[in-house]
Image (tube, helix red, strand yellow):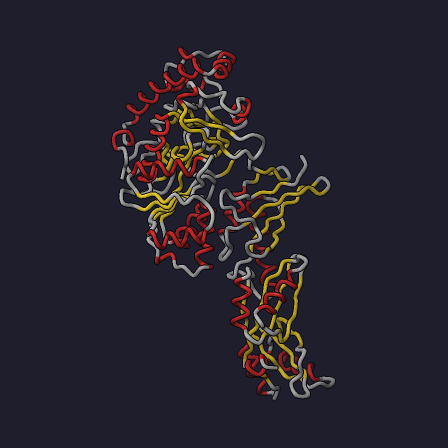
């Protein structure tokens, strides 16, 4: 039910994002989804890729600080209120969304959104109970 | 093991008698042979005959780096040049390097001192000494080399640099004793990690580290990461090179000054007054036996204090506390004295923070701004911004608690702070004062 995400520490220096892209490109790794959180001094790049382990290794070999986190990929119906329903479930359960970002690819007719919750197991249970479709890791890497 | 049982365990009284005898002879020699010293002594109204007891040492004027610079390159040599068999020079960060010379007997004493140092760290015949101090004008490489040979160990004169090759040689040659700067030891630990070499598979047992100030925290880090005992050794080229003082492996607390060769003093760096026993101040050395390049009351600019209590290793020499800073790397920020070692202490007390940092000082308008750059290791990295920001704020708060001044923590990518293969550059002061 969980998806592996890698995160990369980036200093706010020109060209660092390009460096990451280049390292991944050379290793033949395909980026599935990404989000960049930035502050005045640094940024955190979060990626879903088709080969998490390999991506982590090549980035580390190139001197980046890399972390791995588990997130959830949820199918969200592409209509008004689609996202609202999911967030309402979380609110009810008292689960916090640390951050979220959308997938470029669709799954069938639905949008795919990556969520990082503070309580991942509880979130999965609550979402399943309310009929929300959670994508498996393999499904997401292959989208 | 004590290398020279006879001298290293002399009762204080006998030691002081020996020091006095050697001091008198030194002052006479220098007065006769070096016009510059004679002039300085005359200026201070003191003659060799005024040295009647050890206390009289303080009548003599100090020698400073400036004196050495004024006499560049050979002006303070105290023997005819044909007796000089070796010349070393310290890196001149400002202006010309400091040049020192050695006679055959000086080289011999130096080897004795370094053999003592190695023994202090528990090294012995049969050890494989991996000497990664730089060979060349720097005294570290050759100083350690001769001492290890005197000890009867097998020396690998690897010098600095090319860490991957160093680690391969450690594996293949079975190095047991490592000699280098503490920052290079950490660099080797980093490279081992990158190469997936487990230090436990090496034969390394002990490391003798010096040539730059380091802290207890860094010792813990080195000991843990390299799986060795880390010993602090001390020396400076103006006085001899390495081999002036060394910790013993029994205590690892304070460095025994080889007092039959050197007299240490602690003075108030502002007034030049000698401080009472146990007080912290600037370390000053007088060389008792050196022929080619003796120094009288040389001001090291290093901060330390002397420990007079007996040590359980049996050596009777006083110990100097590990160097905690330098009178000249002290930063004055908004009127507050700041030593890089204090910043380091804060950083190392936080789980996962690595001792790779740099202090950058700028002046904006009339205000000093201190920024501390800290590398983000995997241990402290998080995918959440708030976790990293919380960490930065925590370091800022702890520095403020310790120093009373605020600073800005900037998190930087690993290995962006320059890794020295020699001495670590901790401070960049951009203020135009």
* Farthest residue, direction front: B82
Residue at 56 percent across and 61 percent down: it is: A64
Residue at 46 percent across and 33 percent down: it is: B280
Report the side of B388 relative to B58 (left or right): right
Instruction: Name the foreground residue: B67 vs A41.
Output: B67
Q: Is residue A1 above or below residue B143?
A: below
Residue at 65 percent across and 70 percent down: it is: A35
The N terminus of chain A lies in quadrant? bottom right
Q: Quadrant of residue B338?
A: top right
Q: Position of residue B66 (x, y in %)?
A: 55, 25
Instruction: Name the foreground residue: B286 vs B314.
Output: B286
Instruction: Name the foreground residue: B5 vs B126.
Output: B126
Q: Position of residue B199 (x, y in %)?
A: 38, 56
Q: Quadrant of residue B209?
A: top left
Q: Is residue B252 above or below residue A77?
A: above
Number of residue marks: 0
Q: Is residue B238 above or below residue B338?
A: above
Residue at 46 percent across and 12 percent down: it is: B46
Q: Position of residue B24 (x, y in %)?
A: 37, 16
Report the side of B291 relative to B346 (left or right): left
Q: Is residue B99 above or below residue B229?
A: above
The C terminus of chain A lies in quadrant? bottom right
* Farthest residue, direction left: B6
Q: Position of residue B381 (x, y in %)?
A: 55, 62
Q: Quadrant of residue B23?
A: top left
């Amino acid at each position: 039910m969980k998806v592996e995400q890698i995160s990369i520490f980036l200093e706010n220096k020109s060209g660092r994002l390009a460096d990451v892209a280049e390292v991944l490109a050379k290793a033949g790794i395909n980026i599935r989804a990404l989000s960049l959180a930035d502050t005045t001094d640094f940024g955190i790049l979060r990626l879903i890729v088709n080969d998490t382990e390999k991506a982590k290794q090549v980035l580390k070999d190139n001197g980046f600080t890399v972390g791995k986190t588990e997130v959830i990929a949820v199918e969200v119906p592409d209509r008004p209120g689609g996202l609202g329903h999911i967030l309402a479930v979380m609110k009810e359960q008292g689960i916090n969304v640390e951050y979220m970002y959308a997938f470029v690819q669709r799954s069938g007719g639905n949008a795919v959104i990556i969520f990082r919750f503070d309580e991942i197991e509880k979130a999965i249970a609550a979402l399943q109970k309310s009929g929300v479709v959670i994508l498996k890791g393999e499904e997401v890497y292959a989208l | 093991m004590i290398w020279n049982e006879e001298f290293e365990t002399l009762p204080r009284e006998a030691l002081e008698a020996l020091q006095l005898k050697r001091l008198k002879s030194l002052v006479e020699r220098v007065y006769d042979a070096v016009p510059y010293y004679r002039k300085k002594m005359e200026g201070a109204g003191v003659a060799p005959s005024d040295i009647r007891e050890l206390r009289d040492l303080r009548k003599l004027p100090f020698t400073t780096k400036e004196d050495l610079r004024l006499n560049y390159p050979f002006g303070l040599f105290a023997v005819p040049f044909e007796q000089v068999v070796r010349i070393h020079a310290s890196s001149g960060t400002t202006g010309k390097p400091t040049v020192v010379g050695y006679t055959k007997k000086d080289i011999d004493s130096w080897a004795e001192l370094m053999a003592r140092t190695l023994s202090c760290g528990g090294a012995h015949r049969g050890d494989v000494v991996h000497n990664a101090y730089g060979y060349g004008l720097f005294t570290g490489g050759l100083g350690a080399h001769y001492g290890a040979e005197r000890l009867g160990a097998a020396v690998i004169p690897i010098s600095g640099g090319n860490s991957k090759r160093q680690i391969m040689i450690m594996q293949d040659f079975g190095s047991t004793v490592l000699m280098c700067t503490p920052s290079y030891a950490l660099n080797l630990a980093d490279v081992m990690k990158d190469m997936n070499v487990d230090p436990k598979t090496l034969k390394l047992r002990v490391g003798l580290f010096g040539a730059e100030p380091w802290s207890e925290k860094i010792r813990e880090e080195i000991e843990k990461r390299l799986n060795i005992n880390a010993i602090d050794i001390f020396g400076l080229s103006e006085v001899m090179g390495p081999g002036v003082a060394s910790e013993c492996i029994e205590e690892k607390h304070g460095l025994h000054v080889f007092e039959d060769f050197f007299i240490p003093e602690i003075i108030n760096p502002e007034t030049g007054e000698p401080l009472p026993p146990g007080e912290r101040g600037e370390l000053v050395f007088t060389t008792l036996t050196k022929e080619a390049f003796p120094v009288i009351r040389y001001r090291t600019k290093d901060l330390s204090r002397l420990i007079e209590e007996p040590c359980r290793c049996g050596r009777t020499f006083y110990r100097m506390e590990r160097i905690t800073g330098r009178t000249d790397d002290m930063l004055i920020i908004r009127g507050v004295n700041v030593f890089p070692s204090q910043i380091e202490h804060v950083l190392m007390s936080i789980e996962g923070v690595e001792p790779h940092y740099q202090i950058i000082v700028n002046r904006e308008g009339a205000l000093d701004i201190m920024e501390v750059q800290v590398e983000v290791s995997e241990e402290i990295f998080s995918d959440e911004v708030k976790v990293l920001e919380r960490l930065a704020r925590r370091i800022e708060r702890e520095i403020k608690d310790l120093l009373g001044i605020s600073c800005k923590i900037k998190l930087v990518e690993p290995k962006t702070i320059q890794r020295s293969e020699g001495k670590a550059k901790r401070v960049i002061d951009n203020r135009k004062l």
